[in-house]
Amino acid sequence: MNNELFDLKVGDISFKNPIALGPMAGITDSNFANKYAKNAGLVILGGFNLDEETNEAASRMAERDRKEYVTDNPLEFLKDEINNTNTEGAVAANIRSATLEPLLEAAEIIKNADAILELDAHCRQKEMIDIGVGEALMHDIPRLVEWIEKLKETGVILSVKIRANVVDDIELSRKIESAGADILHVDATLEGKNKADLKAIRKIRDSVRMTLIGNNSITEFSDAKDMFSRGVNLVSVSRGVLDNHNLIDELVEGVTDFQEKIGWYNAPKHICAGEGDLRGLTFCCLPIKPCAVQNKLKKLGITPEEFKDLKMEFAKGTKLEFGDSTCFGSLVWCCKLTKFCPIRDGVLYMLDMSGPEYMQLKKELANYILENANIPVNETE
Ligand SMILES: Cc1cc2nc3c(=O)[nH]c(=O)nc-3n(C[C@H](O)[C@H](O)[C@H](O)COP(=O)(O)O)c2cc1C
Ligand code: SF4
Ligand code: SF4
């Protein structure tokens, strides 16, 4: 397998596949990663407690039988854990502190190790929230924004881990993006349910352009596929790896196979299915009759005429220009490869164009539409 198959990169860090081990405090250390996540595109170690206050809070949590990393030398421990991780993918460290200074010191260590810093704005344990850590950051957006800005000044690649459905997801995601974070890691939790909130993921995808890691309740490839089709770039798995030590390998195999066959592992759903994100416009028909596309175009702030022009502009000089026999006279208006259509497939055959090549062009077209519409999305659904 090569790093190019997925074309996944953030700053100078590339991911050989879109499967990540998610952090579990006291559990996901270098040993755990080396054993169960050797083939992951990303392992996220931690969460590590960086100062006295978080270490004390973690000690109190450990008294009620939660596993936690408690140490007198947090920065040395962090450095050793990153260095001892011997997997084939990228490494991130999920960290917590009650004040900014230890996070800045950790940022230097993490950057020098070519790893990713993940700020924990996720933890819902009372002991952490009481000292202003984890979820408390989601409720204090000005402080979260200030910390992101200061951390980014160090040059570190920064991920922010949040839980969906705690505050206004769209406002939070946009603030995190505009503050300069590189990655948003979303635990799409649905209180009381053992499944992810896919709608929350789609709404976040339609609100920001940054790299997204989707997380929650993934135990097999079909769960990961559901999340990919709502626009996440990577998925992470935590509890699932405890139950099935082969989960990461199974997901890597599933997504690699899918990417080789389809060419766009996180291709969106069709918009008429009611589940497609804005990237789904790439598969839309010529807008000549009222349907779900009108609403999406409104959200993008473009008219059907402008949409038509954007698609035609992109198609010019590419193989998407062809396809007289298709419903709207050109492949640029054609459906997703996974939708059975002998007419489109006949055109692909005539053009000597593979399915993955077709989907790659559709992916580029989706980016072109979003970049050129260039209007803040007013997502209200
Ligand atoms: C025991 C345990 C410890 C966790 N510790 C952390 C942590 O330190 N930092 C963090 O951001 N998330 C932490 N999480 C949350 C997970 O990373 C993940 O978001 C959550 O478990 C949902 O994903 P899953 O269904 O794949 O487990 C923890 C989860 C568990 C079960
Ligand atoms: S334009 Fe076509 S693909 Fe898009 S929502 Fe309408 S009917 Fe569906
Ligand atoms: S020709 Fe087939 S793929 Fe193209 S728009 Fe018509 S049904 Fe969809």
Image: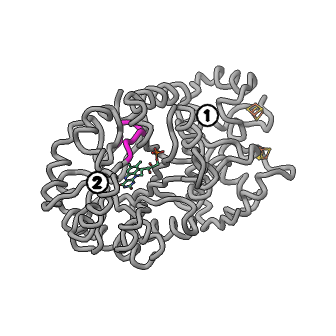
How far across and down, in percent of the image, does residue 92 sit? 30, 50
Category of crowding for the residue at label 2, using alpha-carbon neighbours closer than 10 angstroms: few (below 14), some (14–19), many (at least 20): many
Query: Residue shown at 40%/74% (left/top)?
Result: 145
Colour mapping: one colour
Residue 120, image quadrant: bottom left
- Would residue 368 appear left or right of 106 to someone viewing this image? right
What residue sits 27% from the left and 32% below the top? 35
Q: From the image, tell me which residue sits under label 1.
A: 319
Say left or right for 69 vs 240. Answer: left
Whole-percent x and y of residue 77? 16, 54
Residue sitting at x 64%, y 25%: 348
Pick the residue in front: 253 or 302.
Answer: 253
- Three-letter code, disc 2: Glu
In the image, the segment drawn in magenta is 15-22
Which amino acid, mark 1?
A: Lys
Residue 22: x and y in percent read 38, 46
The x, y position of residue 372, in whole percent, is 59, 59
The C terminus sits in image quarter: bottom right
Q: Is residue 156 left or right of residue 183?
A: left
Instruction: Identify the residue under disc 2.
Output: 68
Question: How far is disc 2 from disc 1 in space, using C-alphas?
Answer: 55 Å
The residue closer to the viewer here, 125 or 223, is 125
Closer to the camera in the image, 335 or 100: 100
Q: In the rendered view of the protein, which quadrant contains the N terminus?
A: top left
| Numbered marks: total | 2
> Which comes before the other along the chain, label 2 or label 1?
2
Judge whether residue 245 can be spotted in this image: yes
236 displayed left or right of 343 = left
> Dot 2: what SS?
loop
- Look at the numbered disc 2 and say if its residue's Cβ is closer than 8 Å to ligand 1: no
Mark closer to the observer (2, 1): 2
As drawn, the residue found furthest toward the front would be 64
